[in-house]
Image (cartoon, rainbow, N blue to C red):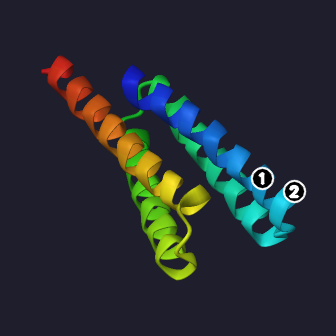
Amino acid sequence: MKLASLTCFVFAVLIAGAGVYALNQLGSIVAFVSCILSAILLFAAGYFSLKGVTGAGYTSGVLTFLLAIYFAYRFIVSERFFISGIFLILSFIALFLILLGVFLSMREEE
């Protein structure tokens, strides 16, 4: 679970940074709040995943998948690669690493 929790921590910091960027550059309070809440949930899932709670790995995977869907929607609507396109790619990379970490930890338990 260490790979999944480390990925959650890094992705949570990146999502929080995107929220700060949205507030400073775009003036969007809604995007800021949603990014900060998502970062808090990802950080909590990473923490519990590090403690060995197996459901936390699945929760972080679902949350990352939902963020990927959100960023895909924002990319299609805005047609801008910066922020939404980059975070779409980062979401899929994070999702892959989280699922890899969960499956590797399941393999170690056997």
Q: Is residue 2 left or right of residue 18?
A: left
- What is the secondary structure assignment of the residue under circle 1? helix
- Residue 9: image location, x then y, percent: 57, 32
**In this orientation, which residue lies closer to the viewer: 23 or 33?**
23
Q: Which mark is residue 24?
A: 2
**Residue farthest bottom in this picture:** 77
**In this orientation, which residue lies closer to the viewer: 9 or 28?**
28
Q: Is residue 39 left or right of residue 25?
A: left
Q: Is residue 51 left or right of residue 39?
A: left
- Residue 62: image location, x then y, percent: 39, 56
Residue 9's place in the image compared with 14, above or below, is above
Local packing at callout 2 (Cα closer than 10 Å; few below 14, some 14-19, many 20+) is few
Residue at 42%, 51% in the rendered image: 89
- Residue 83: image location, x then y, percent: 60, 57
Residue at 44%, 41% in the rendered image: 56
Q: Would you say the residues marked 2 and 1 are in contact, meaning their CB atoms lie under 8 Å apart?
A: yes
Residue at 77%, 62% in the rendered image: 33
Instruction: Indicate the amino acid at tag 1.
Output: Tyr
Local packing at callout 1 (Cα closer than 10 Å; few below 14, some 14-19, many 20+) is some
Residue at 44%, 60% in the rendered image: 68
- Is residue 90 at all visible to an observer of this figure? yes
Disc 1 designates what residue?
A: 21
Instruction: Indicate the amino acid at tag 2.
Output: Asn
Quarter placement of the N terminus: top left
Residue 81's place in the image compared with 92, above or below, is below
Between marks 2 and 1, how big is the CA–CA gap?
Answer: 5 Å
- Residue 67: image location, x then y, percent: 49, 60
**In this orientation, which residue lies closer to the viewer: 22 or 65?**
22
